[in-house]
Image: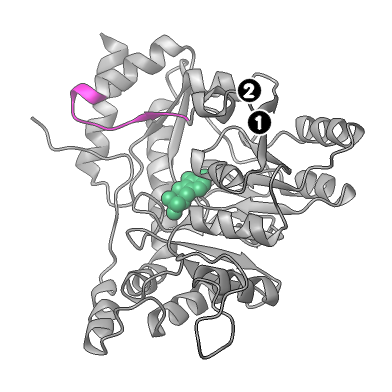
């Protein structure tokens, strides 16, 4: 059996171990500590010094705290991109609030401005203005930032920007992860850089950062005894894992270059097949190409390719199944135009790790060639 080729696997740069050793040498194994502060500063310098960063245990935890900071409460409605990973939407339910799923447009596969505005107008007419919008830069492709944020500000609804897949992506000279009232990052094992597990909340509001850290460390009031006037969480990043993050931040640019190179490789070699197309970067959109996705002509071809790859021990995956199709969200309200359903039917993510060898990329390619010549 050929060795497994993964969709996206962790890729260490070399410096990570030094930061971890430092944590061991100084016995900073607990959450908090110099690596956590250092990692937050590294992200801040990358994104721009006007941002404040709280390193947390996961991207999901960051979304959860972000929604709390935006005032989302029981029975509130939150508009959420339907085409995404479930972690974007789950924290809405943790808070007893209700997700309302919004379809995508075809240019970036992210939030459709028309569907978004229709939903907002209808909800307001019914007497209930949505409390927040969760918009996602899927697979690293920036959403239509100007259109979406204009709508949000017209109706004065805050945006939680889910940038879990898009660290290193840029929209009109500004980095993804800096657009939301609150933005979140993920450092899960499959993301462009990783701490094995981790996330961050990013905001330009220093009080939001302070409150996020407070809530993430069990909401201990300022007193000698453990005094609590809020429900807290155990969501802070560990100092050991933040050490991995510090090392990873030194290679982020290399990772973006490598993933974009994978994308170019697939595009160059597969464009000749009429049955396959790629998502172009619209003007002003720079994608980190976290995952390279292809759109095929039919579900039959998509499944044929996926199974052919699987037979040669190569992992690929259909594009995210939209949240409005998920059994767990079957009762949620939704505004659809058919785009995310079609993407799910015909789209496939190809192995995209920054550590893929030329041999591995060739193996993926020859499997696809063999499928079409069979
Ligand atoms: C990975 C991911 C998350 C969640 O991040 P975790 O760190 O795994 O909790 C949220 N949203 C999207 C779009 C993701 O891809």
Q: Quadrant of residue 307?
A: top left
Residue 17 x/y as whole percent: 23, 74
Q: Residue at x 80, y 50 (%)?
A: 157
Describe the element under mark 2 as helix, strand or loop: helix
Image position of 78 with respect to 18: above or below: above
Q: Is residue 307 above or below residue 10?
A: above
Which quarter of the rendered picture does the C terminus lie within? Answer: top left
Can see residue 311? Answer: yes
Give the residue number, with chain letter if any, for mark 2.
339
Q: Residues within 10 Å of mark 1 (few under 14, many from 20)?
A: many
Residue that mark 1 sits on:
104
What number is the disc on residue 206? none
- Tell me what residue is drawn at x 55 percent, y 44 percent: 88
Q: Residues within 10 Å of mark 2 (few under 14, many from 20)?
A: some
Q: Nearer the viewer, residue 263 or 185?
A: 185
Q: Residue 54, image x and y in percent?
A: 54, 71
Residue found 41% across the figure and 61% down from its top: 198
Mark 1 to mark 2 CA distance (whole Å): 6 Å
Part of the protein shown in magenta: 310-319
Are discs 1 and 2 less than 8 Å apart at CB? yes
Does residue 209 appear left or right of residue 185 in this picture? Answer: right
* Location of residue 97 (image quadrant): top right
Pick whichever, 131 or 143, lies toward us: 131
Q: Secondary structure at mark 1?
A: loop
The residue at 50%/75% (across/down) is 40
> In the image, residue 293 lies at what x, y percent?
45, 33
């Amino acid at each position: 059996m050929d060795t497994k080729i993964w969709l996206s696997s962790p890729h260490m740069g070399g410096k990570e171990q030094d930061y971890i050793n430092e944590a061991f040498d100084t016995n900073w194994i607990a959450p908090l500590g110099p690596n956590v502060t250092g990692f937050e500063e590294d992200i801040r310098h990358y994104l721009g010094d006007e941002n404040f960063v709280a390193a947390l245990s996961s991207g999901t935890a960051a979304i959860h705290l972000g929604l709390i900071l935006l005032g989302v409460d029981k029975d509130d409605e939150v508009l959420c991109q339907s085409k995404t990973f479930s972690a974007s939407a789950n924290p809405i339910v943790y808070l007893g609030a209700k997700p309302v799923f919004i379809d995508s447009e075809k240019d970036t596969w992210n939030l459709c401005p028309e569907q978004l505005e229709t939903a907002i107008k209808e909800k307001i007419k019914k007497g209930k203005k949505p409390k927040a919008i969760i918009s996602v830069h899927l697979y690293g492709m920036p959403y239509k930032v100007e259109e979406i944020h204009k709508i949000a500000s017209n109706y004065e609804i805050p945006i939680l920007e889910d940038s879990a897949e898009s660290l290193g992506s840029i929209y009109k000279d500004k980095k993804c992860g800096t657009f939301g009232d609150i933005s979140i990052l993920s450092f899960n094992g499959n993301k462009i850089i990783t701490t094995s597990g981790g996330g961050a909340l990013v905001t330009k509001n220093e009080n939001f950062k302070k409150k996020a850290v407070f809530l993430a460390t069990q909401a201990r009031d300022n007193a000698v005894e453990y005094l609590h006037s809020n429900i807290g969480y155990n969501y802070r990043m560990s100092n050991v894992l933040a050490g991995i993050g510090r090392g990873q931040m030194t290679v982020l640019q290399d990772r973006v270059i490598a993933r974009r190179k994978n994308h170019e490789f697939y595009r160059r070699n597969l464009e000749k097949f009429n049955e396959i197309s790629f998502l172009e970067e619209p003007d002003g959109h720079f994608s980190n190409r976290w995952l390279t996705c292809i759109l095929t002509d039919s579900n039959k071809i998509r499944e044929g390719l996926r199974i052919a790859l699987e037979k040669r021990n190569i992992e690929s995956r259909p594009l995210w199944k939209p949240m409005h199709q998920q059994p767990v969200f079957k009762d949620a309200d939704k505004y659809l135009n058919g785009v995310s359903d079609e993407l799910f039917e015909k789209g496939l993510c190809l192995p995209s790790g920054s550590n893929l060898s030329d041999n591995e990329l060739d193996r993926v390619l020859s499997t696809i060639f063999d499928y079409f010549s069979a």
